[in-house]
Image (cartoon, helix red, strand yellow):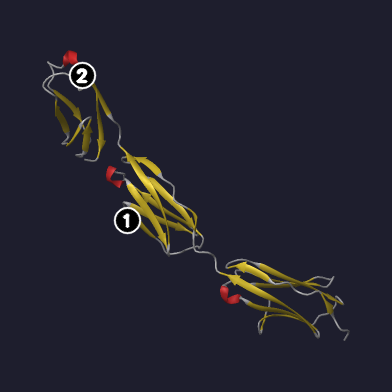
Amino acid sequence: MTSARMVTLYDIECLEGDTVTFRCRICPSDCSTVKWYLDETQLFTNDLNEIQMSYRGDHTLMIRRLARKDSGTITFEAGDKRSYASLLVRAVPAEFTQNLNDVEGKEGQSVTLACEFSLPGVQYQWRKDVQTLRCGEKYQMKQKKFSIALVITDLRLEDSGAYTCICRDQSTTASVRINGKGNTTLSFHNRNWRSTKRIECSSLARPQALIWEGGSCQIPHVIRVNLPPSPSEENSGMWKLRRGRV
């Protein structure tokens, strides 16, 4: 048999999950006794490996879905000639590729916090401030490949806070701000001060903390706020009522 001549292989570095292709050309092109090896293991075409040969003498080895254990020496053998190359598969950095973003929502509605991690299907944990959250009717946790999401349903003012997604030793944090269903604004001036001693307005179906300009109180379903006994420059003008925390 005529001795084969070949173009040598090149070393390749890649990440877990990648696909790589090794190429080698031999002459004469009709050399049929060719073999591919990873270390001492001969490779054949299957779900992960694809071996091809062209009429010009080009030979290729494609390896899919690489894992770190696939690191080693690739050998191409044609007759009495051999070419070697190094295959180095590095671990994918375990990190968030998309961090959480701050969101706002209104009482009774839902908000979604979403992030992406560099590894698919990784275990994760959600926390609100220092409290670990559990999946249920209130908190719906979703994961699809690299994406991780938390849906907070039936929003309440107390749902405001810092939310953190933890994967391995990495974390990302965003704030959730819940707005009330609306602020109540009342105008009260000196001219009707003497005839009105209280302001009364309706609240939500559930007791909330309502904050008046200059003070605060816990409310029942109806709020009655006593006014100062006499008008002055300090208390004349617009009075505002907003829902908040006491």
Task: Say the numbered circle drawn on residue 186.
Answer: none
Q: CA–CA distance between discs 1 and 2?
A: 53 Å
Q: Residue at x 57, y 76 (%)?
A: 69
Query: Circle 1 is placed at which residue position?
Result: 136
Task: Say the numbered circle drawn on residue 233.
Answer: 2
Corner quadrant of residue 41: bottom right
Image quadrant for the C terminus?
top left
Residue type pointed to by label 2: Glu
Q: Determine crowd level at label 2: few under 14, some 14-19, many 20+ residues with C-alpha closer than 10 A.
A: few
Q: Is residue 62 left or right of residue 104?
A: right
The kind of secondary structure element at disc 1 is loop
In the image, residue 108 sits, relative to residue 9, either above or below, namely: above
Asked whether the residues under the numbered discs 1 and 2 touch, taking CB atoms below 8 Å apart as contact, a structural biologist would say no
Corner quadrant of residue 195: top left
The picture places residue 38, in percent across and down from the top left corner, at: 66, 80
Residue type pointed to by label 1: Gly
Image quadrant for the N terminus?
bottom right
Q: Is residue 92 left or right of residue 53?
A: left
Q: Is residue 14 left or right of residue 205?
A: right
Q: Determine crowd level at label 1: few under 14, some 14-19, many 20+ residues with C-alpha closer than 10 A.
A: few
Between 95 and 5, the one nearer to me in the picture: 95
In the image, residue 19 sits, relative to residue 217, either above or below, namely: below
The picture places residue 216, in percent across and down from the top left corner, at: 19, 35
The kind of secondary structure element at disc 2 is loop
Q: Residue at x 30, y 36 (%)?
A: 180
Please count the marks in the image: 2
Between 237 and 101, the one nearer to me in the picture: 237
- For this orientation, the residue located farthest to the right is 2
| Sequence-first disc among 1 and 2 | 1
The picture places residue 50, in percent across and down from the top left corner, at: 69, 72
